[in-house]
Amino acid sequence: MGKAAISMLESIEEEVLKRCNNYFRDVYFNAPDIAQNSLKQLSHGVVKNINQLDIDISCQRWLQRRLLVSPQGELNIPMFGRWIREFSEAY
């Protein structure tokens, strides 16, 4: 991938973050505390999947029903992970 393509990708990612900010904020802050903590750990790379966390099955189901994590327990939306890392503390 050339420099122009990388630059273009970065500007697209910034636009996605801007347009999805309200959605990401609502999903994150309406999540139960344990789900928020799990998402934060996933997005920061503390764990690779939720199976490595000591969370109950209801939290796992909550995350999976909203398609936030894959059936394998990994973060499903990389841009959501980036939003958590960059913006969740600002609110």
Image (cartoon, grey):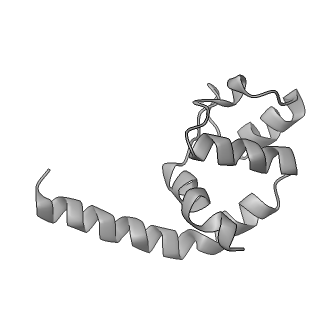
Quadrant of the rendered image containing residue 61 = top right
For the point 76% across and 46% down, the residue is: 37
Query: Is 31 rendered above or below residue 12?
Result: above
Quadrant of the rendered image containing residue 56 = top right
Question: Could you say where residue 5 lies in the image, as x and y percent from the top left?
Answer: 17, 60
Query: Is 71 rendered above or below residue 62?
Result: above
Residue 68 seen in the current view = no
Residue 52 seen in the current view = yes
Question: Could you say where residue 52 lies in the image, as x and y percent from the top left?
Answer: 69, 24
Q: In which quadrant is the C terminus drawn?
A: bottom right
For the point 54% across and 48% down, the residue is: 77
Please indicate whether residue 39 sits to the left or right of residue 74 in the image. right
Question: Could you say where residue 82 lies in the image, as x and y percent from the top left?
Answer: 52, 56
Residue reaching furthest left? 2
Query: Is 73 rendered above or below residue 25?
Result: above
For the point 72% across and 47% down, the residue is: 66
Please indicate whether residue 3 sits to the left or right of residue 84 in the image. left
Q: Nearer the viewer, residue 36 or 58?
A: 36
The image shows a total of numbered marks equal to 0
Quadrant of the rendered image containing residue 31 = bottom right
Q: Nearer the viewer, residue 34 or 78?
A: 34
Question: Could you say where residue 22 lies in the image, as x and y percent from the top left?
Answer: 65, 74
